Amino acid sequence: MSDRLYPLLPQVHRRRDAEVGEPLRALLAVVAEQLDLVEDDLRRLYDNWFIETCEEWAVPYLGDLVGYRTPAGTGGEVPPGLAARLAPRRDVADTIATRRRKGTLPLLEEIAAAVADWPARAVEMRRLLAGTAPLRTGGAGWTPATVSLRDAGALGTLGGPFDTQARLPASAGPYRLPSVALFVWRLRPFSITHAPAYSIDRARNQYTFSILGNDVPLVAEPIPEPSATHIATADNVPVFIGRRALQDRLADFYGPGKSFAIWRDGADEPIPLAQVVVADLSGWAYRPRRGQVVVDPELGRIAFGSRTAPRGGVRVTYHHVFPDELGGGEYPRDLSTGPRVYRVGGPDGEFERITQAYERWRDDNAGGDVPEAIIEITGSGAYQEQLEFTVGHGDRLEVRAAEGSRPVLRLLDWYSNRPDSLHIRGPLPEECADDDRPPGRVVLDGLLITGRGVSVTGVLGALTLRHTTLVPGWAIEPECRPAHPQEPSLVLENTTACVQAERSILGTILVIADEVRTDPLPIHLTDSVLDATGRDREALSAPDCRHAHAILHVHRSTVIGEVHTHAVRIGENSIFDGLMHVARRGIGCLRFSAVPAGSRTPPRYRCPADRPRFTSVDYGTPAYLQLAADCPPAIARGAEDGSEMGVYHDLYQPMRADGLTARLAEFSPADTDAGIVYVT
């Protein structure tokens, strides 16, 4: 409590107050606390006069003062929590400046970044329309109505944002007169830094950039535009790198600090540029010559000569795209502080393996001196270990990735007579009957776990999966199909753990429990994916497709597969692409969620029976679980606040599109109509 007023009293009053137990000091501390609140409020009121320092709720009001218009349909009022999307601070601050540049193409690209946070390229489609050139002009200013079949580079851009070929005018679509098309990229680029590549053959000369062994198209790392009047080119947006583009501009994409780089045999420097060759590695038919390193950017594959194959491994740095910060990745996360940290890997790591750090913690905590610990893994390496964590009452163990890292835990075939999953064990009920401490807790944060699943047994308080991926189907094939679609990624066997998944990707959850002597397990999914690799497979169930002894809580998540559970306490703003069957319909509710017809559910409120349509349902593809353009509006805009249902709800893409459409109508060139074209 604040003690700022008490020293201002005369000494005589403070002496008398001390003689009776300082009640006056306590009273003035309460008054000073309220005074601090008033002063903080006054400071905030002053800050709220300026767009750079105001709170989010004040942004729409400041925008109204300069005539900023929110998208149509909001009635001039901003719903709670959506101020940052419907009235972006950057766009409001630039309102007057953008009006002075109204009608210019570079301005439309800036508006896309300010309003929707999407990279964009504005194209005046009139210049791409074929027509008859007037004789008096000698054909100047008209695009030739012919296509050169020898220009492979131009043919590769057909139909895209960098297309330069002429078209006949059309009555619909972007190729009409007058028209301006704003091509936008919704998928975001993410980096993987100095991570191990995956060898798919015994000769060790064929690799994939992805540690999971799947094909992943490489993406160019965007660079900032040089000036405000610059029209975006392929260097300024996250485009997929084509084979011909890479061959023509290899030096622009390859090397340290660029879009991708390759190291071999533990070398400090990447493979020289002169040794890199671009080719089509479909079917691995291309045979590299001695000293060559062949790269296929469209498939994310690498091939070495059979006589010069690496013996000390291959590491890669590359960029890929994904809809959002979900699952394991190198993106920023909020990391907890306080407990003792045991660092694994990297130049500053105390230990080389995770098991070494765990055993050191067990030794330090033998007398209960270190009940809470963090095992932090630095770097984006791969760890092949037999992992088994035992957590007692009063303990808390967090295994997490360091900032800017994405470690991979590869669970291999270690045993022939029992499962090889990552085991998390708590004590048996009879072993902790007299222990009054709270049950142990385990946190997995920022990890990618493949090869097997996670098994939880014993008395535990909670298992938290935060920004973590348990690969659906244990592993994926080169075409991103699941390797073992029937296998569960998380097994809860005779445990008391409360499972909490936050911004994570999970495979099937299997619950094995004594339904007579134990209470149902609470399972919470928040901004996460529960993927059974097929809508006809079980995403949550007990063995033999019986009802899982669990109570499900789902918020803004996407579930692929059938749900068979004891009850659903709450399901909101979510997508269930698979039948739901609950044993107890009288408790809980579903609201603003898509559920297939024929499901047995708790009471529903505004839950459409339309089936969602996704761009892709295969984990490992760039547009994983992104809603397709023809997805029913009841799902694409069916959430409580008008956003889309499912795991990408908090992207607020419908609001971003509406805001961008409104700005285009206001700032497009005169006598033209502008439209949005989604590239990704």
Image: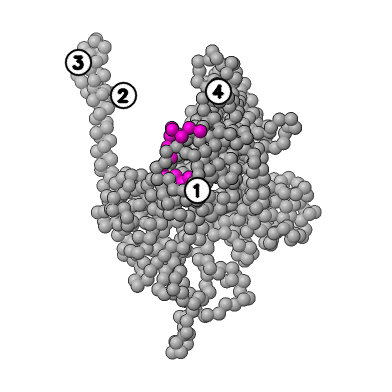
Residue under numbered circle 4: 516
Res 340 label: none
Q: How many marks?
A: 4
- Residues at badges 3 and 4 in contact (C-beta under 8 Å)? no
Front tag of 1 and 2:
1
Which amino acid type corresponds to the residue marked 1 in the rendered image?
Asp
Q: Examine the structure image and report whether residue 587 is included in the region drawn in magenta.
A: yes
Tell me the residue that label 1 is attached to. Answer: 324
Q: Which label's residue is closer to the chain start, 1 or 2?
A: 2
Q: Earlier in the sequence, mark 3 or mark 2?
A: 2
C-alpha span from label 1 to label 2: 42 Å
Q: Of the two numbered discs 1 and 3 on the same chain, state the one appearing first in sequence.
A: 3
- Farthest-out residue, top: 19
Q: Specify the amino acid type for callout 3.
A: His
Residue at the spot x=23%, y=22% of the render? 28
Q: Mark 3 or mark 4, which is nearer to you? A: 4
The kind of secondary structure element at disc 3 is helix
Pair 4/1: label in front: 4
- Badge 1, how many Cα within 10 Å: few under 14, some, many 20+? many
Name the residue located 55 percent from the left edge and 23 percent from the top edge: 516
Query: Closer to the observer: label 3 or label 2?
Result: 2
Q: Which residue is mark 3?
A: 13
Residue at 72%, 36% (x, y): give it: 413
Q: Which residues are magenta?
A: 583-596
Distance in Å between CA atoms under marks 3 and 4? 67 Å
Q: Main secondary structure of the magenta part?
A: loop
Report the side of 32 relative to 505 (left or right).
left
Which numbered disc, 4 or 2, marks the residue that appears first in the sequence?
2
Mark-to-mark CA distance, 3 and 2: 20 Å
- Residue occupying the far front of the picture: 598
